[in-house]
Image (cartoon, coloured by chain):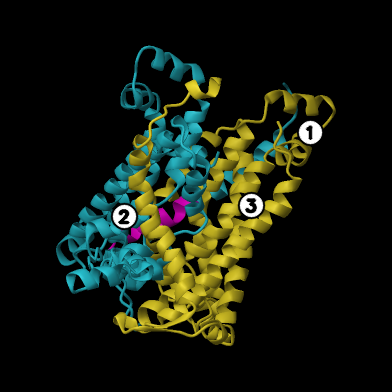
Chain colours: A yellow, B cyan
């Protein structure tokens, strides 16, 4: 067999090579994932105080808690608004930067900068910039009192979170989408232009259809990203407030687990969130992935 | 190709200007506010023009807070994360691609699955594992009944305890348990011609020699890209270092920066000092991006393919 000669056939060496990473992954990925599901069926006492099997009681308790449903609903609203913006804004910028104009060179450089700024750092900065008393909106607030106050108005706080999330999400999505646009053969543009399609029309008839794989991928990753990485923003900008209006699930799990020491409740919510994330990815692959033609 | 693209080029330029202002604006306001005094900020709000207090504010951060030692922690975490991820992912991808092992596909799927559920989601139970990394072993011994045997033979069951919380290892290890690197190197190995391997075999290269003398030099740019990517990701982590380190001297700079903002409402915080902290904390990753942008962009593109 020809394939046999193209591979090493050692018994223990490959195991040894893969072992360090596998060990870390089992220990810090599979065990925690398993434990979250396991604990969701037990009543865990904090500080190792023993555990007791309770069946679906934890799920019943969590699912009958209106706070959980509110946090879940906010998570979905945030996921839909923030992740669509975090794909569409870089998409428009990528289409613009793909054109041969003077600004596209500096833009390609500058738009990657946020990758180096931690979510928590930009959270601290946005908390200051959108501060109602000393921030950007302070002059407007003196004209129209109460126009902008993320400390009181939940919607304002939510908008700040979305703005910060889109800001930090630009580099990755921009780079991926721009790489997709640049891999479109020049002849495609020429052929479409010969057929009378102007540059505006070609965005919709040539560019967007051809970068569907990249667009699909950014959406898949962005959905998970928006649910999880928002923690740093919430913790630094709003602290879950005002009145819990920006308490998303990932933040609620942290508060319940690390401040309320409700390990079973936090694990149960973790398990539910994990199932949600996995289902979401599966749905996207089944329903969206099928329609996309990966052939070039 | 000559065509009239004036309208779209103007629109594109305007769009890019808005995009650049959106990205640079907050950074500029951070820097300009960091260079003003607390009193100036109280009078005028955020600063549109830079002042001369930047180094005074940075001095406050360096002398009065734990940020310097926390930046050292960030450096250790980011660097070790990058180094360990590159090395371990390279080895595991090598094992998966170049060896005839029965479960290669399964192993790869198990590694790849880690991308689906980020650390931030599973933080509660990851914390529990980190508080005693032998707890899975203890549980296995209990469940399989081995511990009963041991207890009969030696008088006491095995119960090992080792907490990695509040250590550098504990901050780094869960970050390394991630599949992106393996994925990236596997993709790279698959693009290499098969004849390369055959030629090396013919010349008598064994697996170790092939790894170090042929693959590693070829993979230089991939390694550099992954290094930059994981360094930045290590530096910018927030939730895990927040719970994984309990003393200020073990926390990372990003966590320390967030702690500079007082929790209680009331008095306006010393924003110029906090912004100077933000500048300091972002200096290392930003200069890394400036110097190694090529690798960063390549890494982002490679990690998706």
* Residue highlighted by disc 1: A198
Give the label on residue A88, or none. Answer: 3
Q: Is residue A285 left or right of residue B283?
A: right
- Compared to residue B251, the image places residue A189 above or below, namely above
The Cα atoms of the two marked residues, 3 and 2, are separated by: 35 Å
Which one is in front, A2 or A138? A2
Q: Residues within 10 Å of mark 1 (few under 14, many from 20)?
A: some
Magenta residues (range): B23-36
Residue at position x 18%, y 69% from top? B154
Q: Quadrant of residue B202?
A: top left
Image quadrant occupied by the C terminus of chain A: top right
Marks 1 and 3 on same chain: yes
Q: Main secondary structure of the magenta part?
A: helix
- Compared to residue B206, the image places residue B175 above or below, namely below
Chain bearing mark 1 = A
Q: Is residue B88 left or right of residue A35?
A: left
Q: Earlier in the sequence, mark 1 or mark 3?
A: 3
Which one is in front, B39 or B259? B259
Q: Residues within 10 Å of mark 2 (few under 14, many from 20)?
A: many
* Residue highlighted by disc 2: B173
Q: Quadrant of residue B212?
A: top left
The Cα atoms of the two marked residues, 2 and 1, are separated by: 53 Å
Q: Residues within 10 Å of mark 3 (few under 14, many from 20)?
A: some
Give the label on residue B130, or none. Answer: none
Residue at position x 39%, y 24% from top? B218
């Amino acid at each position: 067999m020809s394939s046999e000669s193209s591979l090493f056939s050692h018994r223990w060496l490959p195991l040894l090579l893969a072992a360090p990473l596998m060990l870390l992954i089992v220990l810090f990925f599979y065990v925690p994932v398993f434990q979250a599901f396991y604990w969701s069926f037990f009543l865990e006492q904090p500080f190792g105080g023993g555990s007791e099997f309770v069946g679906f009681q934890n799920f019943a308790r969590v699912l009958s808690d209106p706070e959980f449903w509110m946090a879940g609903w906010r998570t979905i609203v945030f996921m839909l608004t923030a992740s669509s913006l975090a794909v569409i804004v870089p998409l428009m910028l990528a289409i613009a930067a793909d054109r041969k104009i003077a600004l596209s060179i500096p833009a390609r450089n500058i738009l990657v900068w946020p990758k180096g700024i931690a979510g928590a750092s930009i959270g601290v900065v946005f908390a200051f910039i959108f501060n109602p008393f000393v921030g950007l909106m302070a002059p407007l607030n003196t004209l129209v009192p109460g126009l902008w106050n993320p400390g009181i108005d939940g919607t304002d706080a939510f908008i700040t979170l979305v703005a910060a999330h889109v800001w930090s999400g630009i580099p990755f999505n921009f780079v991926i989408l721009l790489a997709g646009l640049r891999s479109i053969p020049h002849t495609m543009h020429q052929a479409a232009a010969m057929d009378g399609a102007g540059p505006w029309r070609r965005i919709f008839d040539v560019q967007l259809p051809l970068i569907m794989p990249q667009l699909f991928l950014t959406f898949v990753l962005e959905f998970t990203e928006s649910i999880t990485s928002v923690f740093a923003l919430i913790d630094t900008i709003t602290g879950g407030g005002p009145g819990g209006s920006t308490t998303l699930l990932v933040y609620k799990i942290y508060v319940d687990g690390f401040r309320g020491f409700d390990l079973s409740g936090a694990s149960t919510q973790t398990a539910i969130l994990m199932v949600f994330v996995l289902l979401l990815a599966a749905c996207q692959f089944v329903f969206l992935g099928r329609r996309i033609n990966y052939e070039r | 190709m000559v065509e009239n693209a004036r309208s779209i080029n103007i629109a594109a330029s305007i769009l890019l200007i808005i995009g650049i202002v959106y990205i640079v604006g907050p950074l500029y306001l951070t820097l300009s506010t960091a260079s003003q005094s607390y009193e100036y900020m109280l009078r005028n709000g955020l600063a549109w023009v830079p002042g001369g207090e930047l180094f005074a504010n940075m001095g406050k951060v360096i002398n009065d807070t734990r940020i310097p030692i926390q930046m050292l922690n960030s450096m250790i975490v980011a660097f070790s994360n990058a180094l360990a991820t590159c090395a371990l992912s390279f080895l595991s991808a090598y094992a998966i691609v170049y060896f005839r092992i029965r479960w290669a596909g399964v192993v790869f799927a198990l590694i790849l699955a880690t991308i689906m559920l980020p650390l931030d989601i599973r933080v509660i139970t990851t914390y529990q594992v980190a508080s005693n990394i032998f707890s899975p072993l203890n549980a296995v011994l209990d469940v399989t009944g081995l511990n009963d045997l041991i207890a009969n033979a030696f008088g006491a069951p095995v119960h090992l305890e080792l907490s990695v919380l509040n250590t550098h290892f504990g901050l780094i290890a869960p970050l390394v348990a991630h599949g992106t690197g393996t994925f990236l190197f596997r993709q790279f190995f698959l693009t290499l011609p098969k004849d390369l391997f055959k030629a090396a075999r013919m010349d008598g290269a064994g697996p170790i020699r092939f790894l170090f003398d042929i693959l590693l030099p070829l993979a230089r740019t991939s390694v550099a890209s992954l290094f930059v990517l994981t360094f930045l990701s290590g530096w910018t982590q927030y939730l895990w270092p927040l719970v994984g380190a309990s003393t200020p001297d073990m926390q990372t700079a990003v966590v320390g920066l967030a702690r500079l903002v007082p929790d209680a409402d009331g008095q306006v915080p010393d924003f110029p000092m906090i912004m100077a902290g933000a500048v300091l904390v972002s200096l290392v990753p930003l200069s890394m991006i400036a110097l190694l942008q090529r690798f960063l962009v390549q890494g982002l593109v490679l990690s998706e393919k």
